[in-house]
Amino acid sequence: MSALPLKAGSGALRRKLPKLRLNPVFLVLALLILAITWYNPSFIEPAGLMNFLRRAAPLVVLTCGQLFVLVTGGFDLSAGSLVTLTVIGGSLITLGDPAMTWPAIAILFAIGLVAGAVNGLVVHRLKVPSIITTLGMLLLLKGTALMWSGGSPRGYLPENFRAFGRLVWRDIPVLGILPVAVLVLVAVVAIAAWLLHRTQFGKLALAIGDNARAGELAGIGVGRVRVAAFVLSALSAVTAGILIGGFAGVSVDAGDGMELQAIAAGVIGGVQLLGGRGTVAGAVAGALALYALFTLLNFIGLPQPVRESMQGVILIAAAASAWRQRREG
């Protein structure tokens, strides 16, 4: 007789408990790491993983910034060109002088702050779709970088500037090596996770992405949140540019295509296009999975066009999924 109440009670308890869902991107990342290890057994060693994180750091940082724009229902197509402008601007401002490194970094972050604020204000005040606004900013920043440099790489970055991307501390217990870029990655991820998941700003960003009109009626400062999201994306692009400049040197196409890679990484990590859903952990895992996929393709020997084609497939599939979810909703 006592079994029936117990059964009913357990059913009620199951209904109350939240369903735990594992983001598939973590399984994908694990499988990609196993596949790379099969081609290169030393990859799974601590030093190999640290080098992988060092190379992936710019994409992870850029994806963390892009995440804030995506969850509010927008896109930032200007991030890649801001990466390029950061690399070129860093070389032209410093002119190889180590004493100019910190003033140059301050100027570059100021440029990023202005670019992000302009993007956000145009989207909010003028009601221009973010994809159009940031495409215009992309062309503006890219043109500025080319005019500034004369269309070809000029100057070089001083060693203390390049240290952010290339400096590696050795003889570290357990890890073996510790790149400075990995420390930057960890700091950016920690700040992004705190902002999105532990502050009122993050809750408002997700609410706006889910239903901006309802947010306005509820008294949410939609404009302030959107401008802040674009500013965070721009600042992350400058940070990624500093890392890339340190790692690869000066190039006029340093950030080409990186904005699409960041969007694709977010989508792989479960960020919903059109806004309203996304996590920092998922976005970071998506960026690492995408970079691991690129690494695996390099080991296999597939050409660069295959990489770009796969990004296109990911974005098309994500757009179709987001449209279907919104229609069903």
Image (tube, grey):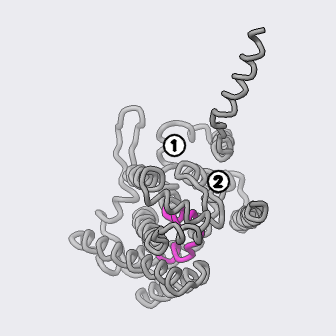
Q: Secondary structure at mark 2?
A: loop
**Callout 1 environment at 10 Å: few (<14), some (14 to 19), or many (20+)?**
some
Residue 16 percent location from the top left of the image: 64, 33
Give percent across and percent down for residue 329. Answer: 74, 60
Residue 301 lies left or right of residue 144; in this view the side is right
Q: Amino acid at mark 2?
A: Gly
Q: Which residue is mark 1?
A: 49
Of pointers 2 and 1, the one earlier in the residue sequence = 1
Q: Is residue 245 visible?
A: no
- Mark 2 and 1 residues: CB-CB less than 8 Å, in contact? no
Report crowding for label 2: few under 14, some 14 to 19, many 20 or more residues within 10 A (C-alpha).
Answer: many
Q: Is residue 112 left or right of residue 45?
A: left
User: Which circle marks residue 284 in the picture?
Assistant: none
Quarter that holds the N terminus: top right
Q: CA distance from mark 2 to mark 1?
A: 24 Å
Tag in front: 2 or 1: 2
The structure residue drawn at horizontal position 31% and vertical position 71%, both measured from the top left corner, is: 105
Nearest the viewer among 120 and 294 is 120
